[in-house]
Image: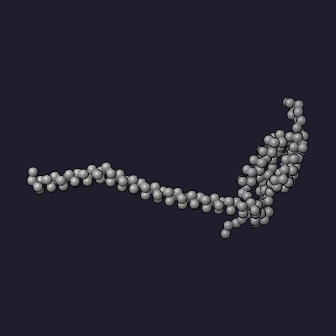
Amino acid sequence: MSRIKKNSLLLVGFVLLFILACKFSFLKTIEIKKQYHLLLEQTGQKISSDNDLHYLRKQHKYYDSILVKNQIFSKTTFHNKLLITLNEICKIKALKLLKFEKPLVLEINENAIQETYQFSVQGGYIDIVSLIFKLEQELKMGKIASVSFEKKKNFKQAKEFLECKIYLQKTATILYSQ
């Protein structure tokens, strides 16, 4: 074999060896490096989104504290809160919540409204009075405007029961955004 032929075969061997090395090791290393950079980028985005979420939660707590401090509640929130509270108290006191109607809204002036919630309960006198006391004095849900007791009789079961209509008034402040 001549020297030129040996050198050309050696060169072809090196080229084939280089191609095989690229195919099996270098390309996988480059691919893993690309995945590594992609994961680093996603981690950076996750950290920034976690920071944003933490900031938004702090803002939410701050705004809620302002609303609670100034006693500004949206109608539906107070409406739902009152209904949940009534259900919990009725379970404890063995009362039955018969009616819970939509609130009557009266505009007092340009930045205050008065909402009147009407609901009816059935049960014993002491339990109803303790419900009224808890709503007005302990939980400070509003002012009791009217209480109407009515003794009724169920002729099918020959039992008497006490039904009470309660009107609860809540004055709320309206904030106008300018």
Residue 99 percent across, percent down from the top left:
79, 44
Determine if residue 57 is in view.
yes
Q: Nearer the viewer, residue 166 or 17?
A: 17
Q: Quadrant of the C terminus?
A: bottom right
Q: Nearer the viewer, residue 54 or 147?
A: 54
Q: Nearer the viewer, residue 15 or 57?
A: 15
For the image shown, how many numbered marks are present on the structure?
0
Residue 113 percent across, percent down from the top left:
77, 61
Q: Nearer the viewer, residue 30 or 74?
A: 30
Query: Which residue sits at x=74%, y=51%?
Result: 81
Query: Which residue sits at x=24%, y=51%?
Result: 17
The answer to whether 96 is drawn above or below residue 17 in the figure is above
Judged left or right of residue 29, residue 163 is right
The residue furthest bottom is: 178
The answer to whether 51 is drawn above or below residue 133 in the figure is below
Which image quadrant is residue 123 in? top right
Residue 87 percent across, percent down from the top left:
77, 44
